[in-house]
Image: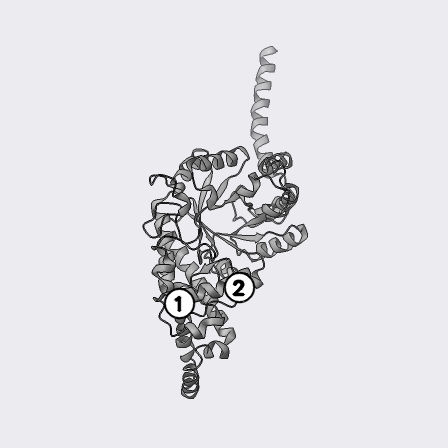
Amino acid sequence: MKRAGAIICFYMILLLSAILPLQQTAAPSPPPPSQQNAQTSATPNSTPRPETRALWVKRTTMVSPESVRALVMRAKENGFTDLIVQVRGRGDAYYNSSIEPRAEDLAGQPASFDPLSVTIDEAHRYGIKIHAWINICVVADIDSLPRSKDHLIYKHPEWVMVPRGIAPELYNIPPDGGSYLNRILEFSRVHHDELEGLFVSPANPEVKQNLLNIWMDVATRYDVDGLHFDYVRYPNPQYDYSHISIDRFRDEMEKKLTDEERETLAAEFRDDPLVYVKKFPAAYAQFQRDQVTEMVERIYKGVKKIKPNAVISAAVFANEEDAARSRFQDWKEWLRMGYLDVVCPMAYTHDTETFRQQMQGAVNLASGKRVWGGIGAFKQPAESALEKIRVTRELGAQGFILFSYESSIKVSDINPHGDYLEKVRNSLKRSSG
């Protein structure tokens, strides 16, 4: 009897072991509501990517091995997966570059110190991904000009964007004379509240090529996991009216004119270089959008040829209509055409409902690409930032980025104990069970 009972028990175990996996496969539990959007957008039989938890790291942290190591340790301890580290701030390099001058902030460090290389080595030890954050069009602060005479504003003043207010005056002035750049600086300082600095014009083919060279240099020589666009835009609608931008637009428009229209406008152009811009304002705005889009396309395709797995992302103005109209930053088109892998709307508002609307717009426009919500940690307490992280999850975004790491460790009114990252970590732990 004992032997018969043992045999029966053995076959029962075999039967149960065959049935249980089938039940688990046939009836998976539904995902939580906050994950359903993200899973819906995944391709059949694909595994949804884990949430990206990133920090924008300003160049002020990239100035010593000690500050870089402290950055990586804080990121590791607080559960961040990606670091977006600024390696080109104002036409300078926080890495070993043969194209641009070494950043002045690194003057106290030995020449052997390569901030980007150290950051990559430290972060990869802990499985943290590194994205090289490259400022595109902004190249110099107005009030503190670069000291190096190798800086591009001195070597190539003709690359600098010209404001509309002085465009007729500068059109016939040779840019290699000091008066050209000085006049732009003089005007810019008067209108400082409308500008982040001096910008270079994407309408200039040499500017596009220079930026492509910078991206290819970083992608070729460094083991980065991604590269990140910032300031990939014009400063405002009053720019750029440089000689080359006006001439290229004129050439483009003349192909569409009758002989009579061409002769009339050519005569007017001698007295007013802005006549084509004034006559065709909508076309000029589209021309400027096209310059930025073409630059993004060239860089994206160029990097992907040599580093196909690199993640190409961009920090963009959260309101896509204002971005395209006032900054000529048509990121909706970039996503539609597949020129980005990730879009990062800078939704820095402290109001959670406004943030929700901006993020919903980005998710709707993503065209199958990823969305990382940019949260302004510098202007709101951790509790408010956590509300916005919850929103990114509810809407099906694939991650979030806090701006910035520096504000999150600095003691301030919104961060009285300097423990912003710890609060985020502890809350995320609780929310994930």
Q: Position of residue 411 (x, y in %)?
A: 59, 39
Q: Position of residue 157 (x, y in %)?
A: 38, 63
Local crowd size for mark 1, using a 10 Å CA cut-off: few (<14), some (14–19), many (≥20): some
Q: Amino acid at mark 1?
A: Tyr
For this orientation, the residue located farthest to the bottom is 260
Q: In the rendered view of the protein, which quadrant contains the C terminus? A: top right
Mark 1 and mark 2 lie on one chain; the one further toward the N terminus is 1
Q: Position of residue 326 (x, y in %)?
A: 54, 65
Q: In the rendered view of the protein, which quadrant contains the N terminus? A: top right
Q: Is residue 120 above or below residue 301?
A: above
Q: Are marks 1 and 2 in contact (CB under 8 Å)?
A: no
Residue nearest the observer in this picture, 306 or 125 = 125
**Scheme of image coloration:** one colour
Left or right: 14, with 63 as reference point:
right
Please name the residue shown 40% across and 38% down the image: 118
Q: Amino acid at mark 2?
A: His
Q: Is residue 260 above or below residue 210?
A: below
Specify the quadrant of the image occupied by residue 27.
top right
Q: Which residue is mark 2?
A: 191
Please name the residue shown 36% across and 44% down the image: 222
Q: Is residue 39 above or below residue 67?
A: below
Q: CA distance from mark 1 to mark 2?
A: 17 Å
Please name the residue shown 36% across and 59% down the image: 154
Left or right: 11, with 257 as reference point:
right
Q: Which residue is mark 1?
A: 180
What is the secondary structure assignment of the residue under circle 1? helix
Residue nearest the observer in this picture, 165 or 45 = 165
What is the secondary structure assignment of the residue under circle 2? loop
Q: Position of residue 342 (x, y in %)?
A: 50, 51
**Is residue 53 among the parts visible in the rendering?**
no
Left or right: 39, with 167 as reference point:
right
**Is residue 26 among the parts visible in the rendering?**
yes
